[in-house]
Image (tube, grey):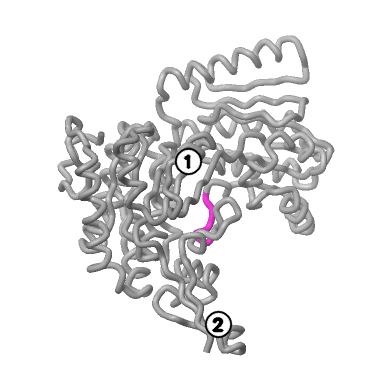
Amino acid sequence: MPSKEMNLPNYFLADLPPEATLSPAMLAEACQTLKRNRERYLSGRSTEQLVKVLSDVADAWLKPDHTFRKLVLERGPGETGFSHKTLQRGLDDFFRQVTPENLRALLVQEFGNARRLDAVTATEVEQKSSRAAMAVGPEFLVHVAAGNIPNPAWMSIILGLLARSAQFVKCASGSAFLPRLFAHSLYEADPKLGACLEIAEWRGGNADLENILFAEASCVTATGSDENLAAIRSRLPAHVRFLGYGQRVSFGFVAREVLSRLNAPRIAARVTDDVVAWNQLGCLSPHVIYLQPGGEMSPEKFAELLADELERREQTEPRGELPAPHAAGIASRRGIYKVRAAHSPETLMWHSQESTAWTVVFEADARFQISCLNRFIYVKPVKDLVEMLQHAEVVRGKVSTVGIAASEHQIEELATQLARWGVTRVCPLGRMQNPPLTWRHDGRPALGELVTWADLEM
C-alpha cells in the first residue's frame, strides 16, 4: 500500500492504511456507489466540459509547483524505483499530449464527429443517406492495470471519463502510487468527476474480490501477460465485454543511408531516449536495434557510440536502484556475453562499471533477442528489412512498435512492409515510448472499442 506520510484524503480504497483489509462487501458497496455517482455527476456531462477538465488537469501536472507533480518527484523514486529525472520526463511526455486539440482530434478520429458521445449526430456521408448515430460508453468500466509503467492506467482513466463511465482501476500490488495521485488530481479539480472513479490495489488472483468486481462490470480492460489475460477472460460473465492488451515487444531499424559520421551521434541519442524512457519497461521500448552495414559507420562502431551515450545519460538521468533479483538477472546475462566476447570477435559488450545501470551487446547473430530490460539493449546487423523480419519471425504477431531511422524517401515503403508483416505502429527513433494521444493501441481504436453504437435511420 502507498505511504501514509503523504497525508492525502481517503477518497480511494488505495488511500487506506497498509493494515486495512479489503472485503467483498466493501468492494460491492464501492461499485454501487460508483454507478450512482456516474448517473448523478457524469452521464449528463458534455464532451466539451470533460475535455476542459482533462486538459486543465494535464496542464497543471506540467507546472513545477503543482502539488501532485511535486509529490511524484519527491516520493516517486522510493515508491516506484524510477529516478527523479525519469519520472520528470515521463510526466512531461505524457501530460503534454493531453490538450483540448488532441482530445478533440481523438474523438473525431474514433467517431467521425467530436459530439458523437453527446447526442445523435451525423457525418457528411451519413447525412447523404439520411442516417445518424450516437456512441454510448459502458456504465461501469473495470481496468486491471499492469504494474510496470503508469501511462496505460492514466490513459484508461481519461478514455473512461470521455466515455462517461464509472471506473474502478485495480492496480497490481505495490503499484497504485502514480494512478492514485492522478486520480487525486482529478478529484481536486472536479470532486464530482473524482467520485466516479475508484483506485485500489491487491495481489492478482484474489477471487473473492475480483469475482465481485467482474460481476458488477459492463466492460473489463486488462493489461498484462497473455496468461493473466486468459485467466481473467475465463472468469468473466458472458455479458461483460473484455478488452485485453497482452505482451508486446518492440525494436528499431537504422538504414545504412543515414549512418554517416555526422548523423550517427544524433541517432544514438534518439535510441538512448527510447531505452531510457521508463527504464525500457514498456511494450513500446526496444529490445534490439537492427542496423544495415555499408554506411559510413559500422554497426559495431554504432554500438560503441550508443554505449558512450548511455553512460553520459546515466550521469544526467540515472536509472535508479533495482530489486536484487532484477540486478542479478542482468549480471547473469552479462556473464554469458562476457564469455562469448572472449571467444568470438562477433560478440562485443559494453556496460556500466560497478553497477547494472546500462548494457550494450553487439552480436553478428541477427536472431531477435528478448532483452532483460532496465537499459539492456542489443545491436545487430542485417542486410535489409526483409532479413530483419525473417529474424523477428519468432515474435510475429506480438510486435507493437518499430522505431526507424531512414532517409525520407524510404520511410513510407518501409512502413508499408512493416504494416503488412503485422507491426501496428511505426515511428521515428526517439519517440517509441512517447506515442501521440491518438495512437491506436495494438492497432485497435482506443475509444471505439469501449462504446456501443446506436444508429438512427431517418
**SS at badge 2:** loop
Between 315 and 404, which is closer to the camera in this rendering? 404
- Residue located 45% across and 36% down the image: 317
At which x and y percent is residue 411? 74, 55
Prevailing secondary structure of the magenta residues: loop
- Residue located 44% across and 32% down the image: 318
Q: Quadrant of the N terminus?
A: top left
At which x and y percent is residue 256? 79, 43
Q: Using the image, tell me which numbered label, if any, was put on residue 90.
A: none
Label 2 belongs to which residue?
123
Cα distance between the residues tagged 2 and 1: 39 Å
Q: Amino acid at mark 1?
A: Ser
N-term mark: 2 or 1: 2
Q: Amino acid at mark 2?
A: Thr
Q: Using the image, tell me which numbered label, if any, was put on residue 234.
A: 1
**Residue 306 sits in quarter:** top right
- The answer to whether residue 437 is magenta is yes
- Residue located 35% across and 55% down the image: 62
Residue 67 visible (yes or no): yes
Tell me if residue 231 comes above or below residue 34 in the rendering: above
Q: Which residues are magenta?
A: 434-438
**SS at badge 1:** helix
**Residue 204 sits in quarter:** top left
- The answer to whether residue 80 is magenta is no
Tell me if residue 421 comes above or below residue 359 in the rendering: below
Between 112 and 408, which is closer to the camera in this rendering? 112
At which x and y percent is residue 6? 19, 40
- Residue located 40% across and 44% down the image: 144
At which x and y percent is residue 173? 33, 33
Q: Residues within 10 Å of mark 2 (few under 14, many from 20)?
A: some
Determine whether, in the image, residue 238 is placed left or right of residue 377: left
Residue 155 visible (yes or no): no
